[in-house]
Amino acid sequence: MNVVVEYYAWIVAFLSVYFLIFALTNAFWLWIYSKKARIFQGPKVSVCIPARNEEKNIEGCIRSFMAQSYENYEVLVLNDNSEDRTADILDSLEKEFPGKLRVFNGKPLEEGWTGKIFAMNQLIQHADGEYLLFSDADTIHGKDSIAFAVTNLTVHNADMLSGYIKEKLVTFGERITIPLMFMLTGFVLPMFLNRITPFPFTSVAIGQYIMIKKNVFEAVGGYESMKNLISEDVFLARLVKKRGYKTIFTDCKRAATCRMYTGYGESVNGITKNIFSFLSNNTAIILAAIFGVSCFLLLPFPLFIGALIANIAAGGWVTTITVLLGINVLLMFIVWVLVSGSQHLPFSTPFLYPVLFGNLVYMATLSYIRTVSGKGYVWKGRVVH
């Protein structure tokens, strides 16, 4: 039994070294790869924002876009059958910013589409820009947001750009949920692979902030090709990469900020609805992921505490197993320090990493159960699957 446990301890120790290496390289990559805004004149940009029941957020978002340093752009907003004051607020803003802001009323949701994709697909029909900037209604953009995206697309000669904006985490529930978004690009997937390989799985995107050339978007089939997907942002990036175009993922904290969810329940619901979809609704992959996270990311911490207590109680030397598990715990803490520093997460995040992994196992399991059972998730007053 001890041989098996020691073998396991060696595995998790080596895994933590792997994660540390790529946490360092990914943080460095984002730092040198993300260029400051320096192009303020250029092709026309169409900013596309879907808004459903966003009376608390939409005005701040629109006003931030009305104060951009980039000169050639338009802002298009679709009121997606809102049931609150969103329509009234948009009408008032459109009158205040004639010519720069255009507001459209969405059609009733058609069968076979997810709500956000159906809304975005309608907006695209009205876009005149050479570049499309997709954003959410709950974001606030810095004055150089559009210029930042244009600059990085141009400098890197890319066709599509995305990246993490600054996430505001207020409650404890948000702090043990939202940081999980940064795992993949933080320390799991080596980000330089996206630049040097043609593999679609190396491309990722965040729907809060995406810029894509309009002709490329149309060439890959637009939203018609993914109309029933929940994680449409990721699939768009993979599709663009698959068709031979170039995608980039940058550090977009300077471009925009957002409080994505409020509280634990909303955070869990918002992220859970994307997990199984992100894994292509593949049962084998999500079960393997749940097993892997449970055994190799979550379990080492309690095993280390238990082994340390047992060593102390026995009055003996710390064993090899305890040392190896301790290496895993220390290095994973450092990994989360790097991720937290890179993404400006709360100071408490590295200390909560075992809770984060436990929460991930819970959400992945819930995502699988809710999807295969057909229950789905209630989002913006609609049920999505």
Image (spheres, helix red, strand yellow):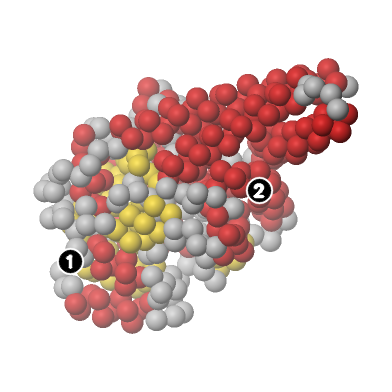
Q: Position of residue 113 (x, y in %)?
A: 49, 58
At 19% from the left and 58% from the top, the residue drawn is 68
Q: Position of residue 73 (x, y in %)?
A: 18, 57
Foreground disc of the pair 1, 2: 2
Q: Depth check: 174 or 115 in front?
A: 174
**Residue denoted by label 1:** 100
Residue 290 in view: yes
Label 1, residues with CA under 10 Å away: few <14, some 14-19, many ≥20: some
**Residue denoted by label 2:** 355
Q: Depth check: 202 or 226 in front?
A: 202
Q: What kind of residue is marked 1?
A: Lys
At 32% from the left and 69% from the top, the residue drawn is 60
The N terminus - image quarter: top right
At 20% from the left and 79% from the top, the residue drawn is 95
Task: Using the numbered discs, state the Cα–Cα distance from disc 1 to disc 2 in whole angstroms.
Answer: 46 Å
Numbered disc 2: secondary structure: helix
At 40% from the left and 64% from the top, the residue drawn is 138
Q: Position of residue 199 (x, y in %)?
A: 45, 27
Q: What kind of residue is marked 2?
A: Val
Residue 270 lies left or right of residue 298; in this view the side is left
Label 2, residues with CA under 10 Å away: few <14, some 14-19, many ≥20: some
Residue 284 in view: no
